[in-house]
Image: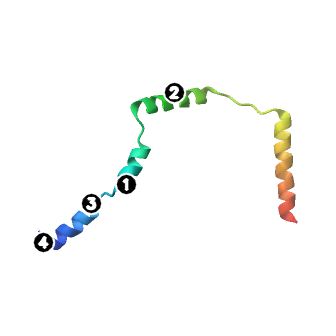
Amino acid sequence: MSNFTLSVLSTLCLVTKNDIKQQEELSLTREEQANFEDTKTALNTLRFSPRTTTLQQIFEYAASQEKGEEK
């Protein structure tokens, strides 16, 4: 293998401190992961049903926004 090929391959495999820092920020500890899973499970059990008046206000707002764009 020539030196040229070796230098090209070694350059492709470089890992910067920034790459390592980003990976550390993305990875969770086991305790954090367990808490995350517990929270996700709890949130998945919640059910939300908006009141009729809330839905009416949402639709009225959307309709007024559409009218504003048409002008």
Q: Residue at x 49, y 29 (%)?
A: 35
Say which amino acid is labelled 2.
Answer: Asp
In the image: residue 33, left or right of residue 64: left
Q: Position of residue 60 (x, y in %)?
A: 86, 47
Query: From the image, which quarter does the N terminus lie in?
Result: bottom left
**Count of numbered marks:** 4
Question: Dot 2 lies on which element?
Answer: helix
Mark 2 neighbour density, 10 Å: few (under 14) some (14–19) many (20 or more) = few
**What numbered label is drawn on residue 31?**
none
Q: Is residue 36 above or below residue 66?
A: above
Query: How far is the residue under mark 3 from the one under mark 4?
Result: 17 Å
Q: CB under 8 Å between callouts 4 and 1?
A: no
Q: Which residue is mark 1?
A: 19
Question: Dot 4 lies on which element?
Answer: loop
Q: Position of residue 66 (x, y in %)?
A: 83, 57
Q: Is residue 69 above or below residue 44?
A: below
Mark 4 neighbour density, 10 Å: few (under 14) some (14–19) many (20 or more) = few
In the image: residue 18, left or right of residue 43: left
Question: Quick one: label 4 or label 1, which is nearer the N terminus?
Answer: 4
Question: Quick one: label 2 or label 4, which is nearer the N terminus?
Answer: 4
Q: Which residue is mark 2?
A: 38
Query: How far is the residue under mark 2 from the one under mark 1?
Result: 29 Å
